[in-house]
Amino acid sequence: MSLRLSSSLVALSFSLPLTASAAPAAEGSASVGTDGVATTSEVAPPDTGKRKPKNKRKDVPWIKRWAPERNMAELGIYGGILVPSRSLELFQADLDLPNQGFKQFKRIAPDVGARIGYYPIRFFGLELEGGAMPTRTTADQAATLWAVRGHLVAQLGLSSITPFLLIGPTALGVSSARLAVGKEVDAGIHFGGGFKVFLSRHAMIRLDVRDTVTAKRGVKDGVTSNLEVLLGLSLTLGRKDKPKPPPKDTDGDGFYDNVDKCVTEPGVAPDGCPIRDKDGDGFLDNVDKCIDEPGVAPDGCPIRDKDGDGFLDDVDQCIDEPGVAPDGCPIRDTDGDGILDDVDQCKEEPETKNGYEDGDGCPDEVPKEVEKFTGVIEGIFFDVDKDTIRAKSKPKLDEAVGVLKKFESVRVEISGHTDSSGKREHNVDLSQRRAEAVKKYLVDAGIDAGRITTRGAGPDEPRADNKTKAGKAQNRRIEFKLVTQ
């Protein structure tokens, strides 16, 4: 039985662009050499306005003039004849009808149809066509054969007369009354050749001779040959437009007027205008980086103070950082100890923050004499529940005065402490007053008051157990603490 369309035919569809872009007209280009002179790679010819541009296509012999081009499309109709095979198996078996069976078709049938094609290159293309072949069976019953085909076309494509070959799949069907052959479709393949004659920009005639191969009646895997001879007329689309007249270059500088922004003044890239000095500083705009501001060498810009530190950028060694004399750079802290290099006596060594000479920027150790007056200071006594210093405290306090006078960079915090007896608020106040009393003694002895701070801790920082008499005695104390800078 025949091969069915639903199982063997792969339908082809083609998306065909019907127009093609015209070739772009040439444009002038120019550049500026290192000496500031315009150099042209493509100069527009002078246009006197007295002669019309030639149509170059007319100068080509006809045999070459209308040769196929890339990206062309064809829309056409055709007519011809079909010579169906005597063994063409196109009928629909219907057991309900008496005496119904295979019938042959007349030997010659008219063949008409339409086609559409697209040729991405001049030598190769794709086409889709459909046709109808009205005929009759040998029993004189009307039937219409029809075909839908897609094929690949290879053509010589070098002249106005172009031979070609084609091959592709076919869906060949019949439509008729049930008493004739009914309705059926067979899948097949067709191949053939012919030639095209391109008559003009948009017109072409074409001759096709092809064979359509389909299933053969009564023979397993047999095939039939069905000859077609077709003559067609096609509309061709997508040819390039005729060459446009060259654009003008009024000032002859190599820039066509359609891109030249100064059509009457010879100029250079990028806009065809002469190089100007907009700000009048003697630097032409093509090298002047500040074309709206008069400036100086090397770039035509005024000398600026980018960081606003009073040092102009031509002498400022740190143009993005506000700085000071002599170079406009900020004073650095090389060793990161918080002491700027202009006062740091040891720029490469960080200061030891220990309360002793912390301002010189050098690492050091606290002298033993100073270290003796850090922490709890034994030997300072007060009257009970008062801030009055007892006379027996004088030797210790005088010793502290001596150390502070010897080491003038030392600053101290004096803190007073009490035991837990009584109310906390009273003890905090008492401890503060006792610390102030010690400070007053030192200041009266000649120590700068700015070097001393005081603090009343009350009972909040015990160093011994307040549950015992001895512990309470230890908690009633004065402490010195070196203050770091």
Image (spheres, rainbow, N blue to C red):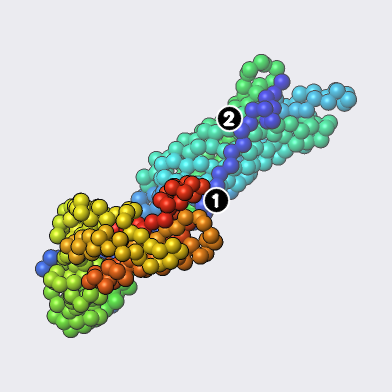
Residue at x-position 26% and y-position 78%: 262
**SS assignment at label 2:** strand
Asked which secondary structure carries label 1, the reply is strand
Give the alpha-carbon distance from disc 2 to disc 1, as whole Å.
22 Å
From the image, tell me which residue sits under label 2: 189
Q: Earlier in the sequence, mark 2 or mark 1?
A: 1
Task: Tell me the quadrant of the picture where the N terminus can be found.
Answer: top right
Q: Is residue 30 above or below residue 155?
A: below
With respect to residue 219, does 329 lie above or below? below
* Snapshot quadrant of residue 477: bottom left
Amino acid type, callout 2: Ile
Give left or right: position of 114 versus 459: right
In the rendered structure, the answer to whether residue 263 lies left or right of residue 229 reads left
Residue at 67% over, 24% down: 3
Residue annotated with mark 1:
75
Mark number, residue 253:
none
